[in-house]
Amino acid sequence: MNRSLLTEVSLIAVALIWALNFSVVKFSLLEIDPMSFNAFRFSLATLFMYFVLLRSGQKLVVHKGDWPKIIGLGLLGNLVYQSLFIVGINFTFAANAAVMLGTIPVWIALVGRIFFGQQLSWFTISGVAAAFLGIFLIMEGSETGITLSSENIVGDIVILVAAFVFGLYTLFTKQMLGRYTPIQFTMLMMLTGGVALIIAGLPWIVRLDFGAVSAAAWGGTLYSGLLSIGMAYIIWNYGVSRVGPVRTATFQNLVPVLGLVFGVVLLKEPLLLWQYVGAAFIIAGIVLARTKPKPKLRTA
């Protein structure tokens, strides 16, 4: 198997890991509270990334004047985003969370246009419109319709805010990734926002009944910490370096589709007809938002 094909197979594996993570997290949260779960999985991820950093031989040196940006990004991308994610998925279906979080490229396009002056193609505008129509159909198509008295609707909204936060985080990290390698930058994010998550979870950890947590729930913690956060990120960045960011990003389109399937099949989540239609609109919107128009050929 040539290296390019091996890279693409690895990226498909990452999409599977991330898609399954929604159901794994949802299952583990039945026995572990969200804040403790976040603290446990980020403890594992931080240790794993430190091991990777040592094996890579790279030194963790922060450039002068970068600490405020690193701390701010670490808190935004880990403490704020991950707290919103774990609380949101605790209140909604794993299938809903997978599709809603898949709107990150849509938010990146909108935030990039509003705050960074980036141009939007008609593909992107169509994708944004389709995604928001899909969001409305998922919420309105539930048993209760759009009402804040429904836990699922509250969870959906929190997940959407999490997607927006991660889109903002992604845009602000571009400059920093030009100054640090992906492994160095990830380690710095773990030492700031990741450690903040661990500290934030301590009050819940001391009240957790460890004896009531099953081996399967602990297994979900290991899966989410070591595979979904640790290993998958390394493979993803390797893919960017081998086949380029555009080609790598196309594999992320599989995540909301597979996440929806896993939620329905593994957790038996009862989605209704219009919610499936809404999911289809969101997935189509994600693909359109990622589509780049072909450059026009110049005529002599």
Image (spheres, rainbow, N blue to C red):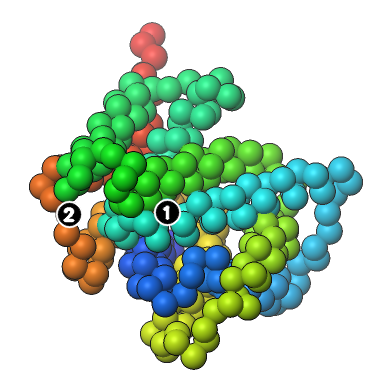
Judge by depth and name the residue closer to the eye, 298 or 13: 13
Q: Sequence-wise, which precedes: disc 1 or disc 2?
A: 1
Residue under circle 2? Answer: 271
Q: Given the image, on which type of amino acid does mark 2 rest?
A: Leu
Give the residue at the far front of this rendering: 149
Can you say whether 160 is above or below 95 in the image? above
Give whichever of 101, 40 is nearer the camera.
40
118 in relation to 166, above or below: above
Residue located farthest toward the top when viewing the structure as drawn: 300
Q: Measured from the top left, where is residue 161 in percent x and y?
A: 47, 42
Q: Which residue is mark 1?
A: 88
- In space, the residues marked 1 and 2 are separated at their CA atoms by 17 Å
What amino acid type is highlighted by mark number 1? Answer: Gly
Residue closest to the eye, 32 or 121: 32
Q: Quadrant of residue 299?
A: top left
Residue name at image x 68 percent, y 52 percent: 74
Q: Which mark is residue 299?
A: none
